[in-house]
Image: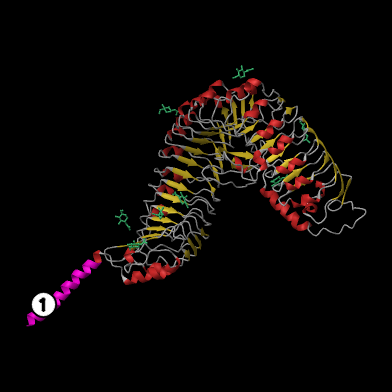
Amino acid sequence: MPEASHVIPYGVLFLFFLLSTFICTNHACKEADHNSLLSSFDISSYRLNWSSSDCCHWEGIACDAGGRVTHVSLPSNRLQGSISRSLGSLTHLSHLNLSHNLLSGPLEAGLFLSSSRLEILDLSYNILSGKLPLFLSSSYIQIVDLSNNQFNATIPSSFLQHAWNLSSLNVSKNHLTGQIPSSLCIRSSSIRVLDFSNNDFNGSIPLGLGNCLKLETFRAGFNTLSGTLPSDLYKAQALHEISLPSNLLFGHISDNIVNLTSLTILEIYYNHLSGTLPLHIGKLSKLKLMLLHLNNLEGHLPPSLMNCTNLIELNLGFNHFDGNISELNFSQLDQLIKLDLVSNHFAGAMPKSLYSCKHLKAIRLSGNDLEGQIQPEIVSLKYLSFLSLGRNRLTNVTGAIHLLMRLESLRVVVLSNSFLGEELPDGDAMIGSGFQNLHLFSLSNCQLRGHIPVWMSKLKKLRVLGLSSNILTGSIPPWLGSLPSLFVIILDNNLLSGGLPKELFSLQALVSDKPSAQTDSGDVELPIYARPQNGSVTSLQYNYLSNLPPSISFRNNSLSGNIPIEIGRLQNLHHLDLSINNIDGSIPDQVSKLTNLEKLDLSRNHLSGGIPASLSSLHFLASLSVAYNNLQGRVPLGTQLQGFDATAYEGNPGLCGSPLPNKCQQMNTSDNRNEIPWLYISVTLGFIVGFWGVCGPLALSTSWRFAYFQFLSDVKDRFVC
Ligand SMILES: *[C@@H]1O[C@H](CO)[C@@H](O)[C@H](O)[C@H]1NC(C)=O
Ligand SMILES: *[C@@H]1O[C@H](CO)[C@@H](O)[C@H](O)[C@H]1NC(C)=O
Ligand SMILES: *[C@@H]1O[C@H](CO)[C@@H](O)[C@H](O)[C@H]1NC(C)=O
Ligand SMILES: *[C@@H]1O[C@H](CO)[C@@H](O)[C@H](O)[C@H]1NC(C)=O
Ligand SMILES: *[C@@H]1O[C@H](CO)[C@@H](O)[C@H](O)[C@H]1NC(C)=O
Ligand SMILES: *[C@@H]1O[C@H](CO)[C@@H](O)[C@H](O)[C@H]1NC(C)=O
Ligand SMILES: *[C@@H]1O[C@H](CO)[C@@H](O)[C@H](O)[C@H]1NC(C)=O
Ligand SMILES: *[C@@H]1O[C@H](CO)[C@@H](O)[C@H](O)[C@H]1NC(C)=O
């Protein structure tokens, strides 16, 4: 009997044991974890499939054999609110991925205190803010991605204190301040990725990177880091990528950089680096991207640079490099796709060896001291899409255009400020013989003689035409109005005469208010720099042609006749400048239909009559001048028109009323209540609006990898085409 009484309990125990192993191998969720999850996420508001009674089967959740939650992976689930402290009680959590949600608020202190097994923490692409936690308690942590949030304090020095096995830290795109943490690699020798870019970090880059023997990617661009490149950076021999653009770094690039033989990306553009390129830079034979533009680098390019045979993009623009460029042998750079040497002091002829870089899509050598002619061998560059050679001393524009017409891929051609005093080639033989993909053609500031050539009438894809500051005579050809894509025409400072052809006012791309349609893959291989045409010293950078303001500018010619009423059709026009001509008649009411107009300059003509009150419906108008005409009557009362400076109206003896000093005789003049708000709007818009100029000092920089543009006003004396 005692035997039997023992058998049953043993049997029950055995059964219980069997059952429990069965449950365990099925990861039945531990209640504590179940409850932590439920109190961490408000499932009623999300479409999470958390219906099963076993939380280990819930969407995004995984457990270990003991039924403890190890993975919480809920990216892109539109999760909102703050990250609940209860998550911290999942003591076995190793993977937490809540990226691409709408989580906000600070990370509560202590959230990760008991998460001692955390290996992967991905909270990127949320709107988390405030400080980072004092430290992550897990010594297993490998990946920390907090990028794309709004964290805005310094990184506590204790933050990764226990992170012996850290391999990747990404805090890019936040508002973090203070210094980049030093000595990360002293604790963890396995770091491969460090990304501090797009924050407000300041101070210098700390010493200590030399201990990062496995570091492959180091990014800290778009901060305000100063000081020199730390000397032990060159000991991190595994480095593939050094990316430090848009900081305040100065000093030299050390010769020791050639020790980093794995380097494929070197981008330190838009800093204050000085000195020469390391003599043996050619040892970096894996380099693909070398972006060092917008610095103060100088001297000759070392011949060994041409041993970097894997280069895809070389940008050394806006520096002080010199030397005879035709002595460099580019022929080994057969992977090269983009070459930008804009605004340096290179002399000599176009290097012929460049024409053997068959993959080239973009060449910009403008703003140097090149001379001679474009050689016939250029026609072997079948993929060339972007060619900018302006601001040099090239000759033979006729030969240049005939050759370039044979390059079928060409979309952007800028040849401004060269070919002084030559004749712009024309002739029936040229009609329809090339440039069929041309989107932008600029041949400004060349003092070229001739007419607007007829071959241009066949450039069906032409969107932007700049021929200002030449000595072109004749009239504005009516066929210009039939180019279906044209939306920017700049013909300033020529001797063009005759009337404004009516056909111009049916320009398809300007008539419709739709964003310039059809061919809009609209990006350009290199950004275009353009200066507002108001004498401003700063330029804007355009990564897409479609971002250029739709413009017609015929300033300073000898145009005559009236402004036709058909002008009202150009709904998409942003800038209209007809100043300094001989235009007469009145300002047609229809101008007020150009509702996108930001700039209107009709000054220095012979316009008469009154200022149409309807002009006040141009709500975007930020710049207006009708000065020096024969306009009469009152500046329309109580409208935005009174918000402009008196200089907008001066030189019209018959004009009166605010903002002009002379009061109108017959009526009361007290009504100027709208003046202040409109002035404010004008000024605000004035800072936003750019204008397509020809060659302007540069004020901007970005990487081709960041598709946005930024307005920086502190870089002067940098000329672009
Ligand atoms: C919800 O998850 C369970 C597993 O726990 C699965 O069987 C079921 O098909 C899922 N339902 C939906 C709608 O995805
Ligand atoms: C987090 O999930 C996203 C989306 O599935 C994924 O792209 C990302 O790589 C994950 N993060 C980590 C660190 O694995
Ligand atoms: C670090 O990683 C190594 C190898 O992956 C492993 O053996 C070790 O246990 C890890 N140490 C910690 C503290 O996670
Ligand atoms: C860091 O995260 C950002 C996104 O927030 C991503 O674009 C970037 O590539 C990441 N850095 C590295 C080195 O992977
Ligand atoms: C370029 O590389 C070749 C082969 O490695 C070498 O012989 C030559 O000296 C190098 N040229 C320069 C200028 O460093
Ligand atoms: C201009 O260039 C063309 C094409 O390269 C060439 O045939 C012609 O001889 C050149 N003219 C002069 C004057 O050098
Ligand atoms: C008008 O253009 C001529 C060249 O055609 C130039 O010399 C003159 O300075 C320009 N005048 C103004 C006011 O821009
Ligand atoms: C020119 O225009 C730009 C942008 O529209 C504006 O920021 C700048 O102040 C203007 N400069 C002058 C000299 O009017």
Q: Position of residue 154 (x, y in %)?
A: 51, 59
Which quadrant, please, contains the N terminus? bottom left
Q: Is residue 260 left or right of residue 375?
A: left
Neighbourhood count class around disc 1 (C-alpha, 10 Å): few under 14, some 14–19, many 20 upward: few
Q: Is mark 1 within 8 Å of ligand 1?
A: no
| Quadrant assignment, res 163 | bottom left
**Exactly how many numbered labels are in the figure?**
1
The percent position of residue 488, horizontal first and vertical second, equals 66, 38
Q: Is residue 10 magenta?
A: yes
Instruction: Kindly tell me whether residue 116 is visible in this rendering.
Output: yes
Horizontally, residue 671 falls left or right of residue 324, namely right
Where does the image place residue 389, in percent across and percent down from the top left? Answer: 60, 30
Q: Amino acid at mark 1?
A: Val
Report the magenta stretch's main SS.
helix
460 or 529, nearer to the observer:
460
Q: Residue at x 71, y 40 (%)?
A: 533
In magenta, the rendered stretch is 1-23
Would residue 598 be found to the left or right of residue 314 on screen? right
Residue in the foreground of this view, choosing between 384 and 220: 384
Residue at point 62%, 21% (across, down): 399
Residue placed under numbered mark 1 in the picture: 7
Q: Secondary structure at mark 1?
A: helix
From this view, report whether residue 229 is shown above or below residue 340.
Answer: below
Give the image location of residue 40, x and y in percent.
41, 68
Looking at the rendered image, the quarter that the C terminus falls into is top right
